[in-house]
Structures are given as C-alpha cells and as structure tokens.
Amino acid sequence: MAGTKEYGLGEFTFPRGWFMVADSAELKDKPLAVRFFGQDFALYRGKSGRVVMLDAYCPHMGTHLARNETSYVAQDGCIEGDSIRCSYHAWRFGPDGKCNEIPYTQVPIPPAARVKSWPVVERLGAVFVWHDPEGGEPEWEAPNLAEWDDPAWVRWKTDHLGTLNCHPQEVVDNIADCVHLGPIHGSTVQFFENEFRGHLAIQRQGGGHRTLVGPDGKSPVLITDTVYHGPGVLLSRMTGQFESIIFIVHTPVDDGVIRVWHGLLVKSPSGSKVATESDVALARQFQAAHLQAFAQDFEVWTYKRPNVHGMYMPGDGAFRKARFWYKQFYNPRARKQEFLGQAEGIHVPQGMKGAPDAARTMPLAEAVASTKWI
C-alpha cells in the first residue's frame, strides 16, 4: 500500500473537493461515527432534518460524541433540536460546533469550548462534505441531477462496497484507461477520448459490452459520457439497453485507504412518465448487472500493487494528463493553473477514434457546466 507522498501528488495528504460521507438512509435517530481524511467525525440529522458533521471529540475531556449507547444521555437521546449532547458530562454543541450549554455550571462558556463544524450538503440520497486542507470555501457546487426528482427515473439504492486498501489515485486512473475496457469488461471500443477542464475530468467512449447485455444475451452499443466532478464523485450517463446514470464515489479514509459506494439511476424501461413497479424491478436488475461490471475493476484494485511509476504505451490512454489534472486537488489553489496547463484539452489514445460530435453534446457533458448541477 502506497500513500500520497509515494505518488508525488503534492503538499497535502488528502485532496480538496466534495466527498460522500454517508448514505442518507443511515442517518436516523442516533449520531453516526465516521472516519475520513485520517480523522474521526460525528455525523447526525437534527430534529429539523438538517445534517450536521462535527469533529468527533469533545474539547472538555476528549469523549467521542457519536460512540456511546450505555449512558443515560445516549438512552434518552443525545440529539436535541439540531444540537448534540456529549454522553460523558452532558456538554451540548450546536450545529456550528459551539458549546451552547454546560448544565452544571453558571460561569460563561469558554470560547474554546467548540469543535469544528464541516460544510455538508444532502443530495442524490447521499451526504457530501467539502474537504479543503487550506480551510477555504467550496470552489464548486456539489453535484446534483435534475433526473433525481423526475418520477420517470428510478432512484438507486446505494451499494455499500466498504473499504479498499488502495490509494484513490489507482481508482481515478480508470478515467483515462482505454485499453482495460476489452480485457476486463469485454467491451469492443469504437471510440474513446478524455477531456480535462477545470475540476472536471471527462471520458467519452462507446462500444459493445459482454457484461451489460439484454435478455437475448446481446449487447447494444453502449455510449457513456463520464464525468469526475472533482476528485471523488463520478457520474456517467449511459445509453444502450436502458438510459441510466452511473454513480460511483470514493472517499479517503486514511492515507492509502478509501471507502466506495455505487448506484444506478435508471429511466423507466417502459417509457412511463411515472416509474411502475415493473420499472423498479428492471432498474434493480440493471443496477445489479452494472455492479457486476464495476466489481471487475474493484477486484483488480484489491490485489494490484501500487502503480507509482507506470510503464505506459502510446495507446493506453492519457494517464499522465489525468495525473496532472488530479494533482491540482493535492496542492494549494494558487498552484491550480500550473497543473491544469499540463492537462486541459481533448486527448485521444494513439490508434483510437475520438468521440463523434453527438457524443460531445450529450446532456451530462453539458450539465456539468450548467445550473442542473447546482
């Protein structure tokens, strides 16, 4: 297992960007203890419905705010309004991280009695946090999809794939990996290209597929328009058997360890304006089939050694361009253009056809620069 330093990515161990930290369905009446970016957090939903993420440890005596079930505070419910009460001595912290009650003293609450509160948004059935080693405001909006609220589309049920002992660099490399599509997925690639633009890494490709096949066992031509929206959130519009949008997200847990989730948003196979029970059943089957295809990549990542210095061939894909694009998130914002200047543009692997104009104007590619994503 290699870490950020071995890959030579930059000054920061963990990147800047929006990252998933929980499935919305996980947030119920108790706080959730989560660990990301080498830190522990307390994540909870307040009584108003607001999602709050705080540093985990109470400044009083270091108690974990989300890891207690036996105290009477926990049994009675440690979430009060949008605040959370520490189970050890009952200090209460608001969603801004400031202590707003110490029940056994009348002295003013010290200003240092606070924990860090993190910027979070809830959308697409997930909770996303903005992580920035420099502590800056979000540089772009968290991803969103108009289709999520369209009744003709079947929402995914998130697949929790657990932790993977590999650096996220290995996963992001896939955006440029043209040649693996045949050996791993059985694809017959007809065109492939990458475009790097600001915080977006785009892959456009089309061809047949041996895993995502129809009832007749044959694969239609699948065209995917895939976008990394920052370093950890991938959305991909796929046309073929069904129109769908792939959701694959990964978040660093520790240096060289990530947590991974998967989902598939599927347009009603029947063409109904409101998805029927039959549409939902077919969508669940299609998501399971796509998960099988993603598992082919996941298995490789599980057992490969770190690709710190690859032996790339001209037809492999724009790996080096992708890695320059990725470095912007591991370095101060002031250096962003230094890396983008070596990555931006459209890149086609040697011997491969680039995407036709129609593939370059698919709705998802256009949406990344429009208010549909905000």
Image: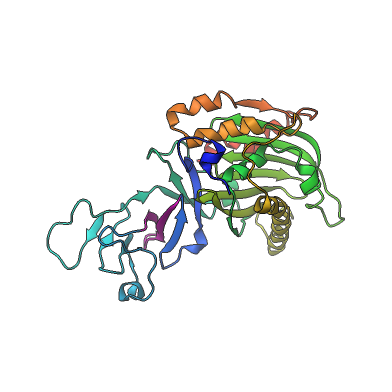
**Which residue occupies the foreground of this view, 200 or 16?**
16
Expressed as whole percent of the image width and height from the top left, the position of residue 227 reads: 62, 39
Magenta-drawn stretch contains 46: yes
Count how many numbered circles sit on residues in the image: 0
The quarter holding residue 201 reads top right
**Which residue occupies the foreground of this view, 79 or 170?**
170
Vertical placement of residue 66 versus 200, above or below? below
Expressed as whole percent of the image width and height from the top left, the position of residue 318 reads: 68, 31
**Which residue occupies the foreground of this view, 37 or 366?**
37
Expressed as whole percent of the image width and height from the top left, the position of residue 165 reads: 58, 53
Vertical placement of residue 347 versus 170, above or below? above
* Residue 268 in sight in this render: no
* Residue 205 in sight in this render: yes
Q: Would residue 371 be found to the left or right of residue 295 on screen?
A: left
Q: Main secondary structure of the magenta part?
A: strand
Say which residue appears at 53% left-offset and 36% top-offset: 9
The stretch in magenta equals 38-56
The quarter holding residue 263 reads bottom right
The quarter holding residue 176 reads top right
Magenta-drawn stretch contains 47: yes
Vertical placement of residue 316 versus 109, above or below? above
Q: Would residue 170 be found to the left or right of residue 20 on screen?
A: right
Say which residue appears at 82% left-offset and 50% top-offset: 210
Expressed as whole percent of the image width and height from the top left, the position of residue 232 reads: 55, 44
**Which residue occupies the foreground of this view, 357 or 79?**
79
Say which residue appears at 47% left-offset and 42% top-offset: 13
Asked which colour scheme the image uses, the reply is rainbow
